[in-house]
Amino acid sequence: MDTHEINQQKAEAFAGRMIGALNEGAIAVMTSIGHRTGLFDAMAGLPSSTSGEIASAANLDERYVREWLGAMVVGGIVEHNPEEGSYKLPPEHAAFLTRAASPGNIAVTAQFISVMGSVEDKIVEVFRHGGGVPYSAYPRFHEVMAEDSGQTVVAALFEHILPLVPGLPERLERGIEVLDVGSGSGRALNLMARAFPNSRFTGYDISKEGVLMAITDAKEDGSTNVRFEVKDASTLVETARYDLITTFDAVHDQARPAAVLEGIARALKDDGVYLMQDIAGSSHVHNNMDHPLGPFLYTISTMHCTTVSLAQGGEGLGTMWGEEKATEMLAEAGFGSVEARRVPHDIANTYFIVRKS
């Protein structure tokens, strides 16, 4: 390439941007470690402390903690006093990095970077040869997804999400039939089952691991009005059975999403409502240029949602299938009314209120 033909200022700016990306990516990995080891939680309760004191408070090895602190200091996450050899997590940072900060704990979401990186070799192979990477290749995905949705969806369920449907909380209190398709580890459904003992709840998920977690939690709660079953969501055969059907971030990575939506339409009573939470965004990449999580969501799509669908011989809709495509597919499934709503605390999701007419 003739370097005289390029805009040198633009090239240098891009190089600087990519160096920044390397550093920010590294900080994301260290943030995940800080969350998983409890370091942020420990530091939030400490005054300025030495690496030994921090390691002791978190019950961790000091040498690793010291090196992690180095990354946190040069990354601008932790403050350092070199004269005293001490470290401090500012309260303004702790407000977005500790378990006590939930639902604002960004460290929870940072775990996805490491989870996705763990399958990079497999993703490179399917780039070259096609096919997909199956759910079984992601040993921590359900754990991290459950923790993340626990902040965005579960935490907002009663105050923000269910009230999006007029009269729904009152109907749940009186008693209705509810189905959650793609229920995962069952956090949302188990929470609703405890809150609304007069209603009956069913959860379907293709993951045996997720269903086992859900059943275990339901037993620990003592809930008798909820059941979970391992089931492929595209094989729903029930007809006009449920007053409310929900999907939480579950449609776009299905192998046969159209069949899933058609099955939901059949299973919903004529006067029932389908509440679909899915990723906020457009079906067209140029409309997502200003999306606050755009690069992150397309990466999650490449590294997980698209490939797990393709691994099943599916359509590979991807995380960013978008509101336009979602609305189109809901209409094709037989729904006559689709309303897209957002909730104030959640920049990542759209909530579709869907009815047959």
Image (spheres, rainbow, N blue to C red):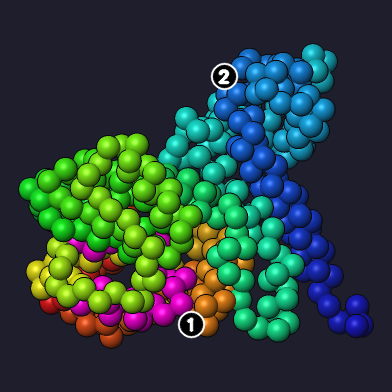
Seen from the viewer's position, the closer of residues 352 and 63 is 63
**N-terminal label among 2 and 1:** 2
Residue 265 magenta-highlighted: yes
Helix, strand or loop at disc 2?
Answer: loop
The C terminus appears in which quarter of the rendering?
A: bottom left
Q: Tell me where residue 30 appears, x and y as whole percent.
A: 70, 42
Residue 66 magenta-highlighted: no
Seen from the viewer's position, the closer of residues 228 and 31 is 228
In screen coordinates, is 201 left or right of 23?
Answer: left
What residue is shown with label 2? 45
- The residue sitting at 60% across, 48% down in the picture is 111
Q: Which circle marks residue 269 in the picture?
A: none
**Which residue type does callout 2 highlight?**
Gly
Q: Tell me where residue 8 appears, x and y as whole percent.
A: 84, 70
Could you tell me how many numbered marks the image carries?
A: 2
Image position of 18 with respect to 258: above or below: above
Residue count near mark 2 (Cα–Cα under 10 Å), binned few <14, some 14–19, many ≥20: few
Q: Tell me which corner region of the image, top left, top right, bottom left or bottom right, holds residue 32.
A: top right
What residue is shown with label 1? 315
Image position of 107 with respect to 238: above or below: above
Please provide the residue range marked out in magenta. Answer: 244-266
In screen coordinates, is 200 left or right of 349?
Answer: left
